[in-house]
Image (cartoon, rainbow, N blue to C red):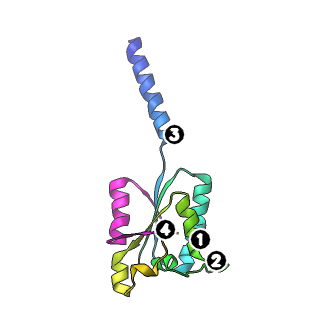
Amino acid sequence: MKTLLRLVAATILLSFAAAASAQDKVVYHFDGGLAQATKGVRNLRNHLDVDPKAQIVVVAHAEGVDFLMEGARTTNNNQEFAALVGDLMNRGVRFEICEITLKNRNLKKDQFILGPTFTPSGVVRVANLQARESYAYIKP
């Protein structure tokens, strides 16, 4: 009986230890243009300041891709997004751009800053991250 109790106690402790060291996984969904991106980039910085180990993926489609284009600037203090995105990427954030949006808006991949990757469908990517990979969903 003592052996069983010790085994149960060890299992419980291991479960708590695993939960405590687990990384949060979050997908940020951008589809609303530069105002949403300005707020969203601030949210991302704050998120990482509190939880630097979080795994974060930003998926952009529709007007949400605009902040990832060369020369795009924030709405509040007119900073270039490229530097802000670069800092976030250095902190582990991944940025993905919807290829359907590129097609629908007649945009080219070389119009975007370096670093983000491209995904066939932003909406499908958000759904897959949530359903298959257990990412929490945030839309700034």
Residue 121 within the segment the image draws in magenta: yes
On the image, the x and y values in percent for residue 33 come to: 50, 80
The structure residue drawn at horizontal position 33% and vertical position 78%, both measured from the top left corner, is 100
Taking the image as shown, residue 68 lies to the left or right of residue 107, namely right
Name the residue that disc number 4 marks. Answer: 139
The label nearer to you, 4 versus 2, is: 2
Name the residue that disc number 1 marks. Answer: 83
Contact between marks 4 and 2 (CB within 8 A): the answer is no
Q: Secondary structure at mark 3?
A: helix
The quadrant the N terminus occupies is top left
- How far apart marks 4 and 2 lie (CA) works out to 22 Å
Taking the image as shown, residue 89 lies to the left or right of residue 101, namely right
Question: Tag 1 or tag 3, which sits nearer the N-term?
Answer: 3
Question: Identity of the amino acid at label 2?
Answer: Gln
The outermost residue toward the top is 1
On the image, the x and y values in percent for residue 67 come to: 52, 77
Question: Tag 2 or tag 4, which sits nearer the N-term?
Answer: 2
Contact between marks 2 and 1 (CB within 8 A): the answer is yes
